[in-house]
Image (cartoon, rainbow, N blue to C red):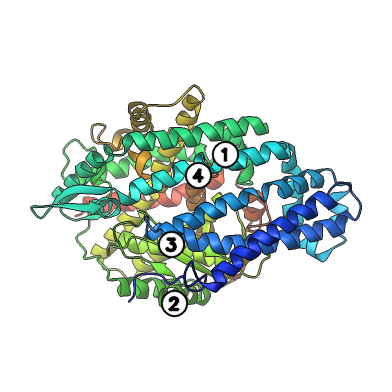
Amino acid sequence: MNMRWDLDVLYTSFDSPECERDWEQLCRETEEVKSWAREQLGNQENAVVKMEAYITKMTSILQKQNRLYSFAELTASVDAKNEKALQMVERIQNQSVELVEPNVQFQKWLGAVDDLGGQIGESALLETHRFMLKEMAEKSKYMLSEKEEIIIAKMKNTGSNAWTKLQEMLTSTLLVEVTVNGEKQQLPLPVVRNMAYEKDPEVRKQAYEAELAAYKKIEESSAASLNGIKGEVITVAKLRGYESVLDKTLKDARMDQETLDAMWTAIRESLPTFHKYYSKKAELLGHASGKLPFYDMFAPVGDADMRFTYEEARDFIVKHFGSFSEKLANYAARAFDNRWIDAETREGKRGGAFCANLHVVGESRIMANYTGSYNDVSTLAHELGHGYHGDCLVKEAFFNSDYPMPIAETASILCETIIANAALQQATPNEAFTILENDISGAGQVIVDIYSRFLFESALIEKRENGSLSVNELKELMLQAQKEAYGNGLDPEKLHPYMWVCKPHYYSADYNYYNFPYAFGLLFAKGLYAVYLERGEEFVEQYDQLLAVTGKMSIADVAAIMDVDVRSVDFWRNSLSLIGKDIEKFVELAASR
């Protein structure tokens, strides 16, 4: 099977007539909406007509912008030095600044509209966009003047956006010097990081040590990038009148502090159970201290042969998705067979994995770095879950296809759960042990490691208020966060002080605290899966409906569709108890090996 994606549905090249045509239309329509906003938004007359005009005009503009930007960003993600892609990304970022003026004018105008709810009800188009319009009106109080907003947007392109691109370039092109089978090699960072899943303990250790050594080449540049981004974020949040960066993040996520606090309370209570798992794994791997070194966190402890060719991964996923729903299985088959996935590891390609939902063409594209481990199969299932979420939103209006980060992880983690549970039912005892351990390991990353990342970013933002942090300070903050989250489960002398370098989540000014959404998604998905086991086929249709409305409801209201109260600590405890049962089963099975 071809392991590189096909982007022709967007454009065949940056020089294609379609790409040039869309760019020209984008620029022309942008100028037209700017003129329209200046002429029409000076009074409240014909408010319904004006709201309809704004939605129509901006939908056309943003669809073209999204198509162009997606093509450029996806191309650059697998080819970091592609000059045309990088140039297009920068052109679109600069062009998007031109939309700031009409957007600010409209949002401020909207915030002053009398009887907004009543006027929305006069139009079918506006009724479809009710949530978006009401949210925009509410957020208008955080808008600065048009002039200030334009200045911020322009400065961002030479500020946080530039720092983000630098960090992507640094990590995408970093070659790690590592010894493999007695031979010294220079390998891309994602390849070396994936060695953490190798069976040979010496390979895992050497890869970890080589990875940490390699970061010294880019640590100062990475620290400058991180300080630059977080400094801008803090400044802009204060200017807009938010209580804090976290306050802004929660409002953008359509989530409240009560929900976040309830989740963290339950997670903190569960940490000793995860520590028990790490200690047992350390024992299985022969660490007399009972403390797991960081480089063995992903070590395979089962002796089952859980390697998959790419074709086997495809068949495995499609088959087990089918146990949940035919629609989900058909989506996954389309993604594999139509080359929506770029799974090949190669130099110049970004590390990790992601899914880009392309609402404008009704498809998605998934980037992964596939090396054949069961974890890689689970990662593909995760990203296909994101894609399925997008598939459920295809018939929704463009503005209603954008959902908040915490809900974004629900479908992806539910798909991981489907794969693990379906596979366990057909596995041999050895395979079952391997699958169970992989599932718990993944949960540990999404609960324990994500908690450490939240602690790190909270401390980083607090200290960044007083000035830039040095490399040593950043490393120390990361070690402190890992010690607090992992407790006595990990060896305190063998942690990962550079985790702030390799995780791209810290390097986006638009998505701060890009960590708790994963924990939310895992636990929300676990809770939903428990509901699925109770309701069976009836649940699947409700689930698809839930995914379809995630772009036009608050998180609490989305959860209420399934009678879930996300502000209740007990909901989160119940979800965590499912993982706790798996850990107890793992410890029991491990004792008999």
Which label's residue is closer to the chain start, 1 or 2?
1
3 vs 2, front mark = 3
Quote the CA–CA distance across marks 1 and 2.
40 Å
Q: Where does residue 49 sit, x and y in percent of width and height?
A: 86, 59
| Residue 365 vs residue 436, the one in the foreground | 365
| Residue 173 vs residue 538, the one in the foreground | 173
Instruction: Answer yes or no: is residue 354 visible.
Output: no
Q: Which residue is mark 3?
A: 75
Q: Residue at x 40, y 48 (%)?
A: 168
The quadrant of the picture occupied by the N terminus is bottom left
Label number found at residue 325:
none
Quote the CA–CA distance across marks 3 and 2.
17 Å
| Residue 158 vs residue 192, the one in the foreground | 158
Instruction: Answer yes or no: is residue 14 visible.
Output: yes
Q: Which residue is mark 1?
A: 155
Q: Residue at x 42, y 38 (%)?
A: 453
Q: Residue at x 41, y 44 (%)?
A: 166
Q: Where does residue 115 sit, x and y in percent of width and height?
A: 88, 48
Quote the CA–CA distance across marks 2 and 4.
32 Å
Which label's residue is closer to the chain start, 2 or 4?
4
Q: Residue at x 60, y 55 (%)?
A: 403
Q: Which residue is mark 4?
A: 161
> For the residue marked with disc 2, what is the amino acid?
Asn
> For the residue marked with disc 4, what is the amino acid?
Asn
Q: Secondary structure at mark 4?
A: helix
In the image: residue 282, left or right of residue 25: left
> For the residue marked with disc 3, what is the amino acid?
Thr
Q: Secondary structure at mark 2?
A: loop
